[in-house]
Image (cartoon, helix red, strand yellow):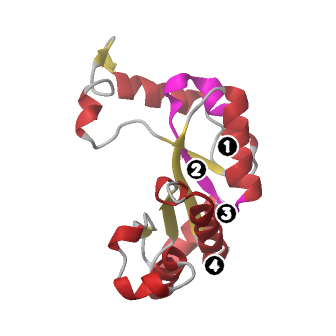
Amino acid sequence: MTRLQIVEQIKHKKSYLCVGLDTDITKIPKHLHAADDPVFEFNKAIIDATRDYCVCYKMNTAFYEASGLKGWEALEKTVHYIGNEHFKIADAKRGDIGNTSSQYAKAFFETMPFDAITVAPYMGSDSVQPFLQYEGKWAIVLGLTSNKGAQDFELKPSGDSLLYERVIKTVSTQAIPIT
């Protein structure tokens, strides 16, 4: 999905709403547990209830990966059910060395039809570059987290700024311009 298409969706729906599908099987309604794929059935109900109002869906892949093959199948069915009218983010926070990042990029941009993936840049530019090689795909770079542990590194001084500020500045000067 292009930047222009996202902006058009925002204007048309008068919304910036992004719906998180961080589906925890232990928290979905009990009646769905009888379904062949309770996670997908829950996601489908949420998508059906929100598709007219939101411009984006974000799936935290850990909730799917934790269930192994069944989780991956639920994730894949969910992404396909959403379709192409909404921006789809794989909240995966990937950020390994270059050749491993290349495989993550392939998984989420070729095998699965995600528009974007969250990446962690703390291993350096070669951990982010593979995600930037896909035209029409987006890498959403993690800079500052909201957890208590952000104090451990991200909010530490680094020269004249905080570490997360240096990371964001570095990433923004090396990233491919948004079109």
Q: Are marks 1 and 2 in contact (CB under 8 Å)?
A: yes
Q: Are marks 2 and 4 in contact (CB under 8 Å)?
A: no
Name the residue type under label 2. Ile
Q: Position of residue 142 (x, y in %)?
A: 45, 39
Q: Position of residue 57 (x, y in %)?
A: 51, 68
Please state which of the two labelled residues, at mark 1 or mark 2, is closer to the viewer.
Answer: 1
Q: Position of residue 145 (x, y in %)?
A: 34, 40
- In the picture of the structure, the residue carrying the numbered disc 1 is 104
- In the picture of the structure, the residue carrying the numbered disc 4 is 81
The answer to which of 27 and 135 lies nearer the viewer is 27
- In the picture of the structure, the residue carrying the numbered disc 3 is 1
Specify which label sits upstream in the sequence, 4 or 3.
3
Name the residue type under label 4. Tyr
Name the residue type under label 3. Met
- In the picture of the structure, the residue carrying the numbered disc 2 is 117
Specify which label sits upstream in the sequence, 2 or 4.
4
Specify which label sits upstream in the sequence, 3 or 1.
3
Q: Which residues are magenta?
A: 112-129
Badge 4 marks a residue whose secondary structure is helix
- Could you tell me how far apart the alpha carbons at marks 1 and 2 are, in whole angstroms? 9 Å
Specify which label sits upstream in the sequence, 3 or 2.
3
The residue depicted at 49 percent of the width and 55 percent of the height is 66
Sort mark 2 into few (<14), some (14-19) or many (20+) by Cα contacts within 10 Å. many
Sort mark 3 into few (<14), some (14-19) or many (20+) by Cα contacts within 10 Å. some
- Could you tell me how far apart the alpha carbons at marks 3 and 2 are, in whole angstroms? 13 Å
- Could you tell me how far apart the alpha carbons at marks 3 and 1 are, in whole angstroms? 19 Å
The answer to which of 13 and 118 lies nearer the viewer is 118
